[in-house]
Amino acid sequence: MPASNKASNEPHVLIIGAGLTGLILAHGLGNRGIKYEIFDEAEAAGSYATREWTMGIHWSANVLYDLLPPHVSSRIVSEASVDPSLDYSSPPNNGTRIYDGQTGKAFQEVTTEGRLLRVSRARLRKLFSEGVDVRYDHKLIRLSYSGDGTSVTGRFSNGAEYSGTVVCGTDGWRSAVRSELFGPEKARAAPMSGAVHLSAAFSYRDAAVAQHVRTAHPVFSWALDPEVFVFVSIQTTPDPNSPADWGFYLLLGWLGEKDTTLSNAQRLALAKKKAASIAEPFRTAVQAIPDDTILSYSDINSWVAQPWDTHQGRVTLAGDAAHPMPPYRGQGLNNAILDVQNFIEAMAKLKDSRADAGTALALQTELIEEYSTEVVKRGAAETELSTKTAYEMLQYHDFMREVKYGLARKGH
């Protein structure tokens, strides 16, 4: 809605950011008959960053399916999962394994109740974009608020202005909405200090190698070693019977400082050196990376959520805009999905209240304050725990000592 149109007492949500969180929010609002518009700074669909990785959907899976229209949710496994041929509701596919990189033995088998979906970020975003009218080439530069408390207006770099009753920032870890609320410095997410991470998505183009790497786990697995932490996930399986074409995603990490002067070939050599003595199949997983693979530094950025001014219930945050966190516990997308559910419930309460204008304004303030307070509390706690876990998993000897102590206490 252009700024010249007056907002009604019913919710009109301006979603800033058309990543996964924003797209899920758009679908969920649409399902509840709540008006929204969604904006993204990318020039056009598909023109956003192309770096690829996998993501896990576990404790929030049922919530996600409830938020999406059936014609979208029914295709998650077939179009976005890393291997559509797998049953993600039963072991071992609904879990993962963590290995001791020195001995090659799995010391922890993690399973979930119900589904644990491993999905391609890019393919999931493509699927969720279906049926959502995103206004691309809209980079937020400023928010302003009406004096009567009824509306918020977003101003964009292309000169456009749109008004609604509430803005929900879903624009990722570099959130422009968060910068509006806190200022650029206070809002800036920081990379993990004293840690190096390298990642790549690629194919081994060798059937025997691909099958061997996947023996650790059919979906994804981890190995901890004094020299390197290795995360391996299947990325894509165009044909389950053609292993040479399987795609993989690898994330490597260790304590230290990254050397930004290294060429790609030098980064590959460094990674292979770090993984020279790790147990199989993780050694092969790294040593067999093709020479033409782009191995990039991955800054694992985080920001510990803190209370923000909702401007009388007219602006809030969700997903990585509210709580960017390290991926070591696989909690980012799951918490984002819960954010979306809670925000939609708040908007539905407002819509269903049929309150007069004055009462509706007070109720909106109350609902958005309650929503935001819960997001901050939950998001900050998970970010801190995920950061703590990340550093622990990069310190092999300390981590394994804790594992053995824990097993001893349990009598194993």
Image (cartoon, rainbow, N blue to C red):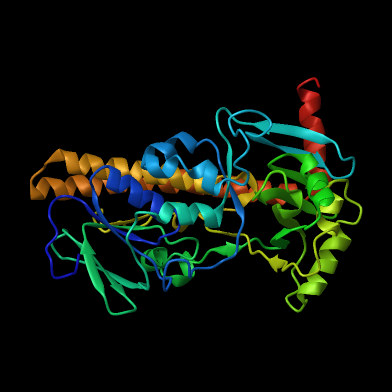
| Residue 89: quarter of image | top right
Residue 193 in picture, x, y percent from top left? 67, 63
| Residue 137: quarter of image | bottom left
| Residue at left offset 42%, top offset 74% | 43
Residue 226 in picture, x, y percent from top left? 85, 51
Judge by depth and name the residue closer to the eye, 398 or 80: 80
| Residue at left offset 88%, top offset 46% | 279
Q: Quadrant of the C terminus?
A: top right
Residue 396 in picture, x, y percent from top left? 81, 47
Q: Quadrant of the N terminus?
A: bottom left
Task: Indicate whether 113 appears above or below 344.
Answer: above
Left or right of residue 107: residue 177: left
| Residue at left offset 92%, top offset 52% | 277
Task: Indicate whether 378 appears above or below 205.
Answer: above
Residue 175 in picture, x, y percent from top left? 44, 64
What number of labels is visible? 0
Task: Indicate whether 17 appears above or below 264.
Answer: above
Left or right of residue 13: residue 300: right
Q: Is residue 44 visible?
A: yes
Judge by depth and name the residue closer to the eye, 24 or 205: 205
| Residue at left offset 59%, top offset 45% | 330
Q: Residue furthest top?
A: 411
Task: Indicate whether 86 appears above or below 304.
Answer: above
Left or right of residue 83: residue 139: left
